[in-house]
Amino acid sequence: MTTHLALLRGINVSGHNMIKMEVLKATLEAVGFKNVQTYIQSGNVFVDSEEENPAKVGFMIKQELFKALGLEVPVVVIGKSDLEACFANNSFLKEKEVDLKKLYVAFISMELKSDSINDLKMSQVKPDEAQIDASRIYIKYAVGAGKTRFDQKYIEKKLNLIATIRNWNTVTQLLKLFEER
């Protein structure tokens, strides 16, 4: 069995794509996922599966959510190593007196090269900053996530992929949960 963390994008936000976590858990258990565990209402769900390929697990979850609930929900599936990399490779953490409340991670559906940062056209969203690390983008917002153009839609449009963003507190909690499994 492999443990996966599925990050569902855009559920329970402003009354859109509403899914109760107990319904999500039951839906995923019904198709054979084991040890299903959700964390907060924003679509973080751990599943154990015989399937090792994260992309296949994501497709299975997306397909089942559409079939069972009629919702088209993008899903990015990551592993424990992806969360560990957030702590090891995020250069913003090395800055003196960094405000953790302004740090976020965009988990994306494909690996990028470091020069893909040019495709993000960061000059259009200054003073926000970003760093690409394979299938993650570390973000440091100047003011905050609610007052920026540099959001998941911007990232998806510029890079032509699926992205879902989590704040630093959530990333920290998800790694703790992974370690407890």
Image (cartoon, helix red, strand yellow):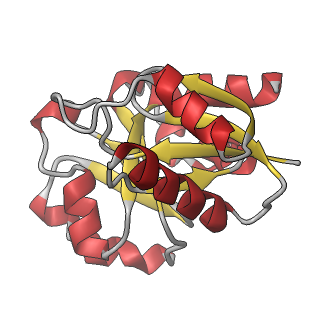
From this viewpoint, is residue 112 visible? Answer: yes
Residue 56 in the image: above or below residue 68: below
Residue 175 in the image: above or below residue 6: above
Quarter occupied by the C terminus: top right
**Residue 92 versus residue 12: which sits nearer the camera?**
12
Q: Position of residue 77 (x, y in %)?
A: 59, 53
**Going by the picture, which residue comes out furthest to the right?**
1
Tell me the residue at 56%/67% (across/down): 134
Tell me the residue at 52%/21% (across/down): 22
Q: Position of residue 29 (x, y in %)?
A: 67, 36
**Residue 110 versus residue 15: which sits nearer the camera?**
15
In the image, is 1 to the left or to the right of 168?
Answer: right
Tell me the residue at 50%/44% (across/down): 7
Q: Position of residue 119 (x, y in %)?
A: 28, 77
Q: For residue 69, what is the image quadrant?
A: top left
**Residue 4 versus residue 139: which sits nearer the camera?**
4
In the image, is 18 to the left or to the right of 134?
Answer: left
Residue 73 in the image: above or below residue 98: below
In the image, is 5 to the left or to the right of 123?
Answer: right
Q: Exactly how many numbered labels are in the figure?
A: 0
Tell me the residue at 42%/79% (across/down): 115
From this viewpoint, is residue 169 visible? Answer: no
Q: Position of residue 130 (x, y in %)?
A: 35, 54
In the image, is 34 to the left or to the right of 103?
Answer: right
